[in-house]
Image: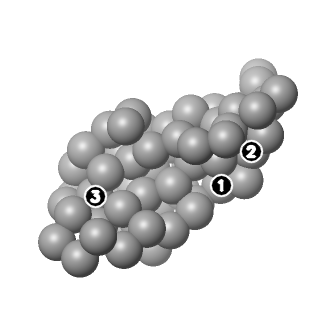
Amino acid sequence: MVDVAQGRILWTRAGDLGATTIATGKSERLVDGTNASPVYGQIEPRGYAWAQGKLVRWRSGRLP
């Protein structure tokens, strides 16, 4: 588990970044990564941010 907010748990597995809705248990992969180049993320009030290697990206709005 990486972060918890907006009723979601943000997680990493095999380098991918994903989210699970706490109320329903439904999981969704958000960003593809690899074991060699994993993705790390954080939920923010207005979206979520993630980093992979030297790249940092942001997506506004609620998690999908």
Q: Position of residue 58 (x, y in %)?
A: 56, 48
Q: Earlier in the sequence, mark 2 or mark 3?
A: 3
Number of residues whose C-alpha sits closer than 10 Å to that of mark 3, classed few (under 14), some (14–19) or many (20 or more): many
Above-or-below relation of 61 to 17: below
Distance from the alpha carbon under mark 1 to that under mark 3: 15 Å
Q: Is residue 10 above or below residue 24?
A: above
In which quadrant of the rendered view does residue 27 lie?
bottom left
57 lies above or below 30: above
Q: Which mark is residue 44?
A: none
The C terminus sits in image quarter? bottom left
Specify the label residue 8 is tagged with.
Answer: 3
Which residue does the numbered mark 2 point to in the structure image?
A: 33
Dot 2 and dot 1 residues touching (CB under 8 Å): yes
Q: Classify mark 2: helix, strand or loop.
A: loop
Q: Label 2 crowding class (10 Å Cα cut-off): few <14, some 14-19, many 20+?
A: some
Rounded to the nearest angstrom, the CA distance separating label 2 from label 3 is 20 Å
The amino acid type, in three-letter code, at marker 3 is Arg
The amino acid sitting under disc 2 is Gly
Give the quarter of the image for residue 44.
top left
Residue lying at 45% horizontally and 44% vertically, measured from the top left: 11
